[in-house]
Image (spheres, helix red, strand yellow):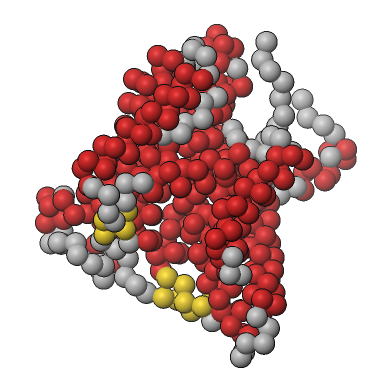
Amino acid sequence: MTSPRSSTPVAQRRLPFGVRLAIWGVVGILLYYVFLVAAQYFTNPDAPDAFNNSIKTSAQQVSNALVLGAIYALVALGYTMVYGIIELINFAHGDVFMVGAFVSLFFLTNAPAPLDFLGLHLTGSIAEPIVLIIVLIAAFLVAMAFMGLVNVTIERFAYRPLRHAPRVAPLITAIGVSLILQNIMQIIVGTGDRKVPELVPNIKIGFLGADIRLISIVIFLVAIALMTGLQFFVSRTRLGRAMRATAQDQQAAQLMGVDLNLTIAMTFLIGGALAGAAGVFQGQYFGFVRFDLGFNAGLKAFTAAVLGGIGNLTGAAIGGFAIAFIEVFTQAVGQARWSQAIVFVVLIVVLVFRPAGIFGQQIGERA
C-alpha cells in the first residue's frame, strides 16, 4: 500500500541515507579542520607565520585523524556486530586485530612461493603499481581469511558452550581468550617491535601546504569500501537479514527458520576479517607491530562502539572517527598526555545525556 503522492513530497525528495551520511561527513571534516586551524593559531599566535603554519599542520593532522579513525572503525565494527547478535562484549577482539597485524607481517616476510612467483623479496616498497596491487590484495586476503577463521574457532570453542550461561561467564572467558592470544604471540615473536615491510612507496601529495602520504589515502579509501560493503551485506543479503533478525530476537528468528549457529559464526567471521584488514593497515601505516598493541587499540575501538551506540554499525564507524579526531586534536594543541583522558570524558558526557550512545536506541529488556 502506498501513500498519496501529494501527502509525502518531502519524503520522496529525501536523499538516500548513504548520500546524506557522506555529505554530513564532509561537512564535519571541514568544520573540524577550521576549528583545528583556529585552535593551533591561538595556541601560539606570536610565532612567525603562525596562521600559514596552522593551515599546513592542520591539514596534516586531519589526514592522520582519518587514517586512525579508519583503523579504529574497522575494529569497532567487530565489537558492535558481536554485541548486537549475542550481547557479548568480546574483549578478545583487540587481540584478534593484533594477531591479524602479525599474520600480514608473516605473509610478507615468510611466504616465498607467491612472492618468488612475482620475482620479489620484500625488503622495501614496490614501485610497480600492478605488482603492488597484487601483493596488497594477497596480504589482505590472507590476513582477513585467517583472522576470520580464528574468530570463528574462538566462538565455537570458547563462547558457544556458554551461550546460555550467566553473562559474567562469557565475559570472563573473553578476557581469558585475550590473554591467551597475547601470550601466544609473545612466545612466538617476543616483546619488542617487529618491523613490517612497507609496500606502498613513500609518495607524498601536497594539499593545503601539507604532505599527505599515499598510504594514508589508500587506507582511508579501502576502509570506506570495506565499511560500505559491510553495510550493503547486512542490509541487502539474506544472511544479513538473518543477522538483523537474530539481533532483534533470537527465539523468534529461530522459529522463522534462521540457523542461529551459522548466523553467529558468520558474524564472528566477518568481524575477524575486518580486524585482519585493520591489522594490515596497522603494519603498513606505522611500519611496526608488537604483541601488546591489541589492548590499546581494542580499548579505543570498544569506546568508539559504545560512543556511537553499540550494536549500530554506522554508530561504531562514526565513533571510531570521533575518537581519532579527539585524540589528534589534543595532540595538535600540545596536550598529548591528556588525549585518552579527554576521550573518556567525552564518552562519559555523551552517555550521561544519551545512555545508548549517539546512534543507539534505548530498548526495554526482553521478556
- Quarter occupied by the N terminus: top right
Total marks shown come to 0
Q: Is residue 225 visible?
A: no
Left or right, 81 with reference to 189: right
> In the picture shown, does residue 53 fall above or below 333?
below
Q: Nearer the viewer, residue 139 or 257?
A: 139
Q: Is residue 351 visible?
A: yes
Residue sitting farthest toward the bottom: 48
Left or right, 174 with reference to 85: left
Q: Residue at x 29, y 66 (%)?
A: 129
Left or right, 18 with reference to 282: right
Q: Position of residue 104 (x, y in %)?
A: 28, 49
- Quarter occupied by the C terminus: top right
Q: Position of residue 131 (x, y in %)?
A: 24, 62
Residue sitting farthest toward the front: 337
Q: Residue at x 46, y 34 (%)?
A: 91
> In the picture shown, does residue 225 fall above or below 8?
below
Q: Position of residue 305 (x, y in %)?
A: 57, 40
Q: Residue at x 88, y 40 (%)?
A: 6
Q: Position of residue 325 (x, y in %)?
A: 59, 59
Q: Nearer the viewer, residue 195 or 112?
A: 195
Residue 270's image quarter? top left
Residue 50's image quarter? bottom right
